[in-house]
Amino acid sequence: MPAPTGATTANTRITDTATSAATANAVSLATEADAAEETPAQPLVVPVDDDPDERTGSGDRTGSAERAGSRDRTGSAAAEKSRGAMFSALRNRNYRYFFIGQVVSNSGTWVQRIAQDWLVLSITGSAFAVGVTTAMQFLPMLLFGLFGGVLADRFPKRQLLIATQAAMGLLAAGLAVLTLSGVIQVWHIYLFAFLLGMVTVVDNPTRQTFVVEMVGKKDLGNAVSLNAANFQTARLIGPAVAGALMAAVGAGYAFAVNAFSFGAVILGLLAMRGSELHRTPRLPREKGQLREGLRYVAGRPDLIWPIVLVGFIGTFGFNFATILSAFAYSVFHVGPGLYGLLNTAMAVGSLAGALVAARRSRPRLRLLVVAALVFGLLESTAALSPGYWTFAALLTLVGLFGLTVNTAANSLIQLRTDPAMRGRVMSLYMMVFAGGTPLGAPLVGWITEQYGPRVGLLSCGLVSAAAAAGIGMVLARIGNLRVQFDLHRGPEHQLLAFVPRQEHAVAG
């Protein structure tokens, strides 16, 4: 979809965008229905392709079928080649600098997260205080997340990221000074957590949307998956470094290490070649841009429903910090070492999910819905685990499918969004995904405390699975599709597929 020019008014932009989206949806559904009538055995996916501009019109029935077969063969070969290029985004020089900086910075972030929680617990002796710290960090995203997307669309993203990364580094340095000087109090930590959340409001949508400027649309899905793998690798490294630092020199030096880690990202951003960036048009300063973004998403069912699904998963499905500690302490009666192993099991599964996603050429709505459904069912099964090691093994699968949901939703939404709207759409995505934590965590914590960890995790899994099933049915109805299960074996058979209702009528 062409980006709107600076001379175009806000009303014209939103009208053109909505018209283009509606046309693409109509072409998608019509094309898929025609293909189904010509080749009934081919299952279809829900309900809009990622690149509607690449479609051609249909001619006569025979010619159409031949062209479809040729496209299928060519597309299959291209998909196989793309799946083989697990690290294709790293061919981009700018993205390599960004990726290396993120490895260092994400590790530092995990170092600070572990040290911060431990420091709060050592000062107060209260697990509730640790939860307050987490809520303070995520609360700004819930309250102000949409405004961060407007800023991401309005200002140059590389310069904006340099500013936000520097601000985060200064906050970590301030926390280190207070801790090392021995004057730190719990309200200081609350304040710094809130300020970090305020910076994240701008940093998160800017960082998410800057990826496509570094790698282009072709490698976006691969880059999103590699970013997730990067974060999960840091999740394995950071806590170990934090534990060693706190045991040797104390939490203050852990905060100092995180402060220095932001320098790696800033250096990478400064070293990038501006001429190699796929720049998106900057949004001029106008009134009503926030409402414009909301109207845009509201008019796009292929965007709004994945965001709703991610909201359910983020609010209820991803409450592991509360539940895993309760399982370790109350259900399996293990110490901190085996509790840490549960987190490691999830991190290993998430890393595997990220690497598998990196081999995938283009995520589909079907993948998102099915992965969310399996994620919920696995959580529910894990809640009934008879022993510790069964629980740990299931957590690995939970981590794999949870990461698949995350990367598929992120890539889908970015690929299907007009570049001029991408910052605002991604800020809504992050607000729903991360902003649900202050709402879901206390509720899940209360259920866990009142009825036990098994009921708490079972509730999270059932809500996630029900949301996936319900939203899958909504998307199928919008696309005039139905769910088809095929238990036969072979490459031409798919266990779950969405096929046109017209095909069912003809078969009947």
Image: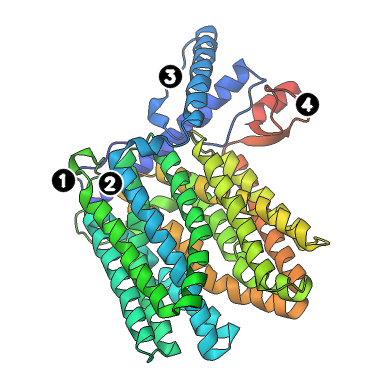
Q: In which quarter of the image is residue 487?
A: top right
Q: Is mark 3 on a helix, strand or loop?
A: loop
Contact between labelled residues 4 and 2, with CB atoms less than 8 Å apart: no
- Residue 161, how many percent across, how many down? 27, 58
Is 80 placed left or right of 12 in the picture? right
**Residue type, label 2:** Arg
Q: Mark 1 points at which residue?
A: 7
Q: Residue at coordinates 33% horizontally, 39% vertically from top-left?
A: 215
Residue 293 visible in the shown view: no
Q: What element carries label 2?
A: helix
Q: Mark 4 points at which residue?
A: 488
- Residue 278, how many percent across, how many down? 26, 40
Q: In which quarter of the image is residue 414?
A: top left
Q: What element carries label 1?
A: loop
How crowded is the residue under tag 3: few (<14 C-alpha within 10 Å), some, or many (20+)? few
Which numbered disc flags the more N-terminal residue, 2 or 1? 1
Which numbered disc flags the more N-terminal residue, 1 or 3? 1
Q: Residue at coordinates 39% horizontally, 72% vertically from top-left?
A: 197
**Residue type, label 4:** His
Identify the mark at residue 13; answer none if there is no mark: 2
Which numbered disc flags the more N-terminal residue, 1 or 4? 1
In the displayed image of the protein, which residue is found farthest to the top?
A: 62
CA–CA distance between discs 2 and 4?
Answer: 48 Å
Identify the mark at residue 57; answer none if there is no mark: 3
CA–CA distance between discs 1 and 4?
Answer: 56 Å
- Residue 252, how many percent across, how many down? 40, 79
**Residue type, label 1:** Ala
CA–CA distance between discs 1 and 3?
Answer: 31 Å
CA–CA distance between discs 2 and 3?
Answer: 26 Å
Q: Residue at coordinates 66% horizontally, 33% vertically from top-left?
A: 497
